Structure formats: C-alpha cells, structure tokens
Image (spheres, rainbow, N blue to C red):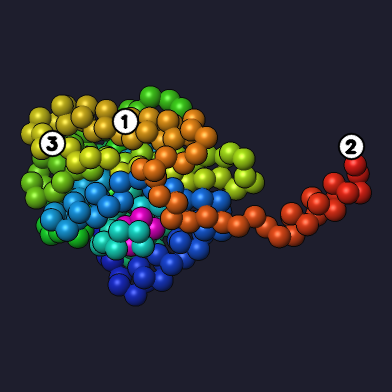
Amino acid sequence: MIAAAKSRWFNAWFARHARSRIQRTFGRVLVAGLGDMSAVLRDAPALVVANHTTWWDALVALYASELLLGCDGYAMMDAANLRRLPFFRRVGAFGVDLDDPADGARAIRHAARLLDRPGRALWIFPEGRERSPYGALALRPGAAQIARVARRATVVPVGLRYVFGASEHPDLWIAFGAPLATERDVARGVLLQQVAIERELARIGGALESALVPAEFTIVHARAPGRVGRLAERFLARLLPA
C-alpha cells in the first residue's frame, strides 16, 4: 500500500492545473447535487463512490473536491498507476494492489484514518479499472468495506459522464446523489452502492434526452465557441454557397 502524502502548496497548484485542463477540454461542466454534497461535508467526512470510465476521473475528483466543493479531497488509486504517476500522492492519492487481499486490508485502514473529520472527501472508484460507460457496473467490495469501518463517514454516490453533443467539445456531467444508509453487511453495501451510482447515471441520461438542461443541473463552466473556427465557417459558407 502506498500512503497519501498530500502537499498543501502542490495540491493548490495542481488543482488549478486540473481546472485549466478541464476548462480547455470540455465545452460545459454540468453538476447536480452540489449544494446537498456541501451540506454533507459540513457535518461529516464523505466517502464518494463513483463509476470509472476514463483517466479523466482522477482529475475530475480533484477539481470537484478542491474547487467546486472547497473540501480536503483524497482518492484511492491502483498502486501500479500511482507508481507510474507518483505526483498524485501529493494531491491526496494512495495506492492499493487490487489483487493482494493483505494490501487491500492495509488500504482500508488507511482510508478509515483519512475519513476522520468533516470537510474531507475520499473518492473511490469501486470498479477498480476503467470500464465502458455503456456496460453494467461491476463493483469490487473495497468501498463497502471502507464504509463499514469508517463509521463517521457518509457514503455519497456519484455518476460521471463525458458526452459529445452539438458542440465540438464534449460535456462533463457530474451528479451527486443522496447519501446512502449505513450498511454493516458488505455484500448488501456493494449492491446499494451499485444501485445508487446507476441511479445517478440514469439521471444524467434523462438530462441528455431533454431539449433543455434540467433545473437540477448547474452549469459551472461554459466554454465560448472558438472565434477563429466560427469565422472560418462563415467565410466558407459565403465562398461555397449551396
């Protein structure tokens, strides 16, 4: 197990870097449940469980924690990826060998120690590795085991989607769900987390089918279309009429 070694100055710099990357890449960032999630963090530490579809997820977790919620964010990573990208330790990531039960037990204890105060959020992607956003979720039990041990923590499900639409840039959708009831049984905890994450993904799916952005989603970032591209398209439209 590779412990987190969070650095305040590096974390502040890298959070701004994550925001810059996200704002350059995505046309819009749309978030639901931000106020409710902030309320949870005022009273308790939060164990955030989310689906895992892309390497962007780690940057999104940092961006959401530090810049949207203003909380002290941490995340669990595959130890192999953390060895390849060791600077993530400085922003609160800790690594676990997903195929080593003993290492998993150490990571659970480390996670429980982190979840000891309000205003702190620990992001877990219980699928373990990136999976297709269109397939069924397949959660490992680690997040449910952490929830059983970290009794102060509130479990919050999150759905993440990265979607191309009418714009040249994809949209990032984040849906924070309602807190889950405390569950001592690990198998049932896994099931409750899976159902809750799927519910948030379905909420995003419903929003994508709507002609307008539903009121429950807040647009926290909207990128203006590129001026050069628009001018080029207008020029070509006049130069090559139908």
Q: Which residues are magenta?
A: 62-66
The residue at the point 46 percent across, 41 percent down is 213
Q: Main secondary structure of the magenta part?
A: helix
In front: 176, or 130? 176
Looking at the rendering, in which quadrant would you find the C terminus?
Answer: top right
Residue 181's tag is 3
Secondary structure of residue under mark 3: loop
146 horizontally vs 31: left or right? left
Q: Position of residue 230 (x, y in %)?
A: 74, 54
Secondary structure of residue under mark 2: loop
The residue at the point 50 percent across, 39 percent down is 212
Among all residues in the image, which is located at the extreme bottom? Answer: 9
The residue type indicated by label 2 comes to Ala
Question: What residue sits right under mark 1 in the picture?
Answer: 199
The residue at the point 30 percent across, 72 percent down is 8
84 horizontally vs 71: left or right? right
Gap between marks 3 and 2 measured at Cα: 60 Å
Q: Position of residue 200 (x, y in %)?
A: 33, 35
The residue at the point 45 percent across, 51 percent down is 219
Say if mark 1 contacts mark 3, CB within 8 Å: no
Q: Is residue 130 visible?
A: no
Residue 54's tag is none
The residue type indicated by label 1 comes to Arg
In front: 76, or 20? 20
Q: Is residue 21 visible?
A: yes
Say if mark 1 contacts mark 2, CB within 8 Å: no
Gap between marks 1 and 3 measured at Cα: 15 Å
Among all residues in the image, which is located at the extreme top? Answer: 136
Magenta stretch encompasses residue 128? no
Tell how many labels.
Answer: 3
Question: What residue sits right under mark 2 in the picture?
Answer: 242
